[in-house]
Amino acid sequence: MATTTRTQSGVAQKAPSAPLSPGEMALNAARILFLGIVVIFTMFPVIWIISASFNPTGSMATQSLIPANVNSLNDLLVNFDSLLNDPQVPFWRWIGNSLLVAIISTILSVMITALGAYAFSRFRFRGRRSLLLTVLLVQVFPNILSMVALYLLLLQIGPYIPFLGLNQHGGLILVYLGGAMGVNTWLMKGFFDSVPRDIDESAMVDGATHWQTYWYLIFPLVRPVLAVVALFSFVGTFNEFVLARIMLSDREQWTLMVGLFNFVSGRFTDDWGKFAAGSLIAATPVVILYMFLQKYIVGGLTAGAVKG
């Protein structure tokens, strides 16, 4: 290990490190090899999708890591060109639908969950603990068990409130909101519990209402967890496929994931090149959102586990 020594002039200098033993060198080499394998294993699907998106054949049977049969730049971009410019494929409409559903679901989910978590954290009322346990218990059961019930529910609501029925984005947003409340409420409640109650008491002494305390004092302090919940909600709804495939039947109403599935669902008409190109484009909003909110992610996930 390196040690620090001082010269006659008083300047601190590091003594030369002792050479590593053969065992330590072997251990470091094993660690580097293991990390390299993990990186390759993690990045291989991404690299393969990128390669498939530039493969002009559009077939997985002839897919290679480096696209073959490429003679010009147009050959590399043929999948993107046909995907974005084909009048029979409303790709931009699908992206707009996905962004619309994801953004509205995220905003409503964050607002409703933040209010519910604040109430569970700060207020004491009869049935509070039972409600928290019920919210947690509901999340134990997978969403696939409720698909039939959700379908019938939207089918019954449609004749009375058309924009919340089947084949409507409003109905799909309603379903997404119901599924996101449980986990997000518990995550936010843990973060609200870490905010000292002295802030609330000081605000009450100054004559502030509960709403003023929440909006002007508590809300700015919980921005990290709000960003985390927003990120999870957006990614979850933007990439969701099963419920969207069941609830939306009109081609113009499809979300991006349902539309992309169309390219690989046919038995003899599958086009993996367009599917891969669409997947790369679909990943762009998620990557941008991750980059924009990355400074909040770690704090929002860990701070709720530590009491203030």
Image (cartoon, helix red, strand yellow):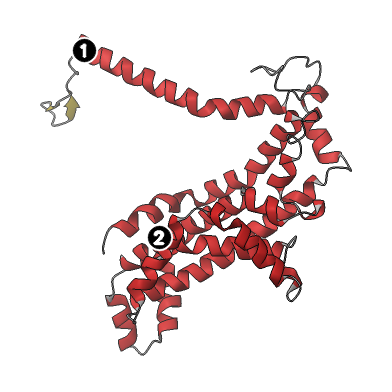
Residues 124 and 201: in front is 124
Q: Viewed as shown, does residue 186 lie left or right of 294?
A: left
Residues 222 and 2: in front is 222
Q: Is residue 219 above or below residue 303?
A: below
Residue 187 got which mark? Answer: 2
Residue 23 got which mark? Answer: 1
Say what secondary structure mark 2 lies in: helix
Q: Is residue 238 above or below residue 113?
A: above
Residues 90 and 302: in front is 90
Q: Viewed as shown, does residue 164 lie left or right of 185?
A: right
Q: Amino acid at mark 2?
A: Leu
**Other residues around mark 1 within 10 Å, as few (<14) / some (14–19) / many (≥20):** few
Question: Of circles 1 and 2, which is in front?
Answer: 2
Residues 185 and 204: in front is 185
Q: Is residue 104 visible?
A: no
Tell me if label 1 and label 2 are in contact, CB under 8 Å. no
Mark 1 or mark 2: which comes first in sequence?
A: 1
The picture places residue 229, in percent across and down from the top left corner, at 48, 58
